[in-house]
Amino acid sequence: MAVRKLKAHHMTQPKPLSSSNPNLEFDALKVEHVHLLYANLPLSLGANLVLALILVYVQRLVIDPAVLFGWFISISMVSLWRAVLMVRWRRNRKGDISILLWRFRFRGGVIASALVWGVGGVLLFPEGDIPHQVFLSFVLAGLSAGAVTSLSVDRLSVLSFLLLTLIPLIVRFGMEGSEISLAMGVMTTLFLIVISQNASRTALTIHENIKLRIEASAREEALQEGKIRLQQLNQNLEQLVAKRTSALRESEARFRFLFEQVAVGVAQIDTMTGRFVRVNQKYADIIGYTPTEMLVLDFQSLIHPDDLKASLANVERLKAGEIREFEMEKRLFCKNGRDIWVKLTVSPMWMRGAKPDYHIVVIQDITGHKQAEEQVHQLAFYDSLTRLPNRRLFLDRLQQAQVHSTRHKTNCAILFIDLDNFKTLNDTRGHDVGDLLLIEVAERLRSSVRSSDTVARLGGDEFVVIIEGLSEDTVPAAGQAKDIGEKFLASITQPFKLQEFEYHGSSSIGIRLFRDGETSIDDLLKHADTAMYQAKTAGRNTLCFFDPSMQIALEMRTTMAIELRQAIARQQFKLHYQRQVNAEGTVVGAEVLLRWQHPERGMISPMVFIPIAEETGLIVPLGKWVLQMACAQLKQWEHDPDTRNFQLAVNISARQFRQLDFVDEVLEVLRKSEADPLKLKLELTESLVLQDIVHSIEKMEILCNAGIRFALDDFGTGHSSLTYLKRLPLEQIKIDQSFVNDIATDPSDEIIVRTIIVMSNSLGMKVIAEGVETEDQRDFLARNGCYTYQGYLFGRPMPIEDFQKLLSRFQKI
Ligand SMILES: Nc1nc2c(ncn2[C@@H]2O[C@H](COP(=O)(O)O[C@H]3[C@@H](O)[C@H](n4cnc5c(=O)[nH]c(N)nc54)O[C@@H]3COP(=O)(O)O)[C@@H](O)[C@H]2O)c(=O)[nH]1
């Protein structure tokens, strides 16, 4: 019987059955027991009544009818009660009455019935009438045997029935006292024992059977339930999958609709290949391709080169997870080759791993905005006629130039340019022609400067130019500014073709040099304007500096440059020789130093004229002359045993060294003079060598191979570095006099000098100190390993005659 059915008999709250739950199993057992008991009851009651009737009928002859009647009524009442019980069980078994109560009631009925039968075994026992006694025994034994079958489901019921039914009979047989009665009693007792045992065993067997059945049912039930649950789960799962699939389809449809209908361009790009994976129509339309054409393109190839770096940097940051998305404005190339401005947003899309698999790119064509912006910018910052920056932008650039000059310590200049007689042209030829002149002047100014310089129009015929990155020193910077100003003057004096007529114009230029932020930009502009008016007053077509001393210095410079040129031809240059001595004070050589003997101004320092000679290029012939003189002197010294081993140091300027034929020229001078190259020492400065280290080394090595020696002049004042020092073919390092000056007083100079000496020694280079003026300085240098000196302590630079005279007088000091 299925457990589900068993549960129906259970009058308590139905509970799920499980073989693993012993309580539930026990409940089910009881239910089954009670059910079987009541199920067997109709037959049992029927048999009871039939047997009672037969018994009463057979015993009527030997037992008092009243007893018989009374007993029969009793058994009938008991049977009736049990029948009622059975009917109620059938009706009410699903009610709320405990199964134990039903079992109790049943047992009550059994006991009552057994008691009546047991009483019957005494009352209906005919004394001395063996056949009727046997019959009675037979009925009761039969009844007991029947009870074993119908009651053995419940051991208590069956045993109590057997005991209560048979024991009175056994007692009665015993009371009879006859041999046969006693034998019958013994036999009935044996029967009782045997049948009780059987009943017990049957009860056990039935119990086990039911238990097995229940367990099997429970297992089957559990299996069935599992199956049902699985089916339900499966069903739920299918429903869920169906729901999700439909949601996904819906979302996909929505996405596709959005992707296609959205008013911006959307594309999906493979992060690995940079290729377009999916492109909506709008995207393709913006850049003039079809979506299919775009699938063979990679995103990078469409980006304008100017925006590529910034774009790739953003993509890298996105890939690295540094940013969640980025937005930028950039240019993309269209299919027709033109570029457009787009506002672009890129966000990552993950499918598999930690790194994004795709990028979603959204673009909006903002070319129109950009053009409008550009127009607004042009109107705000540019002069509409000449397209030059206007006053606003000029002031901004001027501010930037100030910052730049402060940071880099370079000079800048403002050139204020005003066209001469512009008003007359305007009045006579009309504004259109005037405008044409302004446009043309703007173009000429623009083409005369570097793109980094600013040419602006302030209004009318006033132009301003900002020149940045001029020399650090004021006078050379002024010279550079003047050169540019003169270029402008010359350019504007070139004829202009204005419509059909040729116009000859000129301009006046005011120059204001500036170096840091001390002067306000308004003042700078005013100063340049003032200088321009000075130029106008000076007769136009000219330029003026705001600072008159600058003008004077420049003029002097110009004069000196002219005079320098003449000085070579007029042989106004002389060479002075300054001795170089060793630790013992013995002269080991000299440095040649150029002097300009000016007929009016007297002796001019090389500090003054060498920079001008450099600027004008005159240093090249001048330097060659110095070299020729030095080599001739060396050749001469060869004849004297006292001077034969002298080395002569010659200063080489940067411009001279940079000449393409410098090496050939030096070798040529040496060859012609027949001087010993080993005695010639060329002094190069650190900055000169570092300007172009590769070519410097190249040239030095060729000359070195020819026997010429090199010394590094002014060492310590530049960017001294071991790395380059090791690469240079140097014989000697010259400690700059600025360090020597203060070695006694400045501890840091002391350290620098010591370091230079140690470094030179470790690199296997000789070291010489220049500017040695005191014995203390010499002693300090000697103590620290420098044994060659040059300076006023040993002798000032002097003409060769004095040098020779002194040589013969004091070989030692
Ligand atoms: N390219 C060339 N440059 C040259 C040449 N001749 C000179 N110069 C360079 O001009 C700079 C100034 O030279 P000068 O005025 O001659 O000064 C030199 C010495 O007079 C001076 N000196 C020497 N000893 C002392 C001293 O004890 N005290 C002191 N205050 N000054 C002293 O030092 C100058 C030597 O400098 P250096 O060349 O670095 O050894 C100078 O830079 C010259 O290089 C030339 O023909 N060509």
Image (spheres, rainbow, N blue to C red):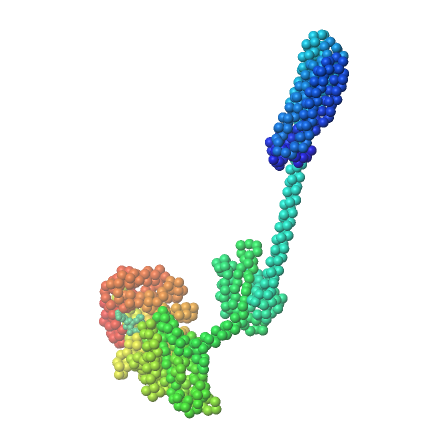
Measured as percent of width and height from the top left, residue 695 is found at 42, 70
In this view, the residue farthest toward the front is 66
Q: Quadrant of ligand 1?
A: bottom left
Left or right, residue 480 beside residue 181: left
Image point (64%, 46%), residue name:
234
Q: In the figure, 273 relative to 424: above or below?
A: above
**Can residue 365 be spotted in the picture?**
yes
**Camera-side residue of 360 and 412:** 360
**145 or 609, nearer to the observer:** 145
Q: Quadrant of the N terminus?
A: top right
Within the image, what quadrant is residue 268 found in? bottom right
Total labels drawn = 0
788 on left or right of 243: left
- Where residue 163 appears, x then y in whole percent? 66, 18
| Residue 133 visible, this angle | no
Residue 283 horizontal/vertical position (percent): 58, 67
Using the image as rendered, state which of residue 493 and residue 91 is in the foreground. 91
From the viewer's side, name the closer residue of 176 and 605: 176
**Residue 319 location (% of width, % of height):** 51, 59
Where, by quadrant of the figure, is residue 610 drawn?
A: bottom left
Q: Looking at the image, which residue is at 30% across and 67% down?
A: 736
Quadrant assignment for the C terminus: bottom left
Residue that appears at 63% across and 66% down: 292
Q: Quadrant of residue 647?
A: bottom left
Vertical order, 323 against 118 (above or below): below
| Residue beneath the point at 52% across and 73% down | 368
From the viewer's perspective, is 600 left or right of 327? left
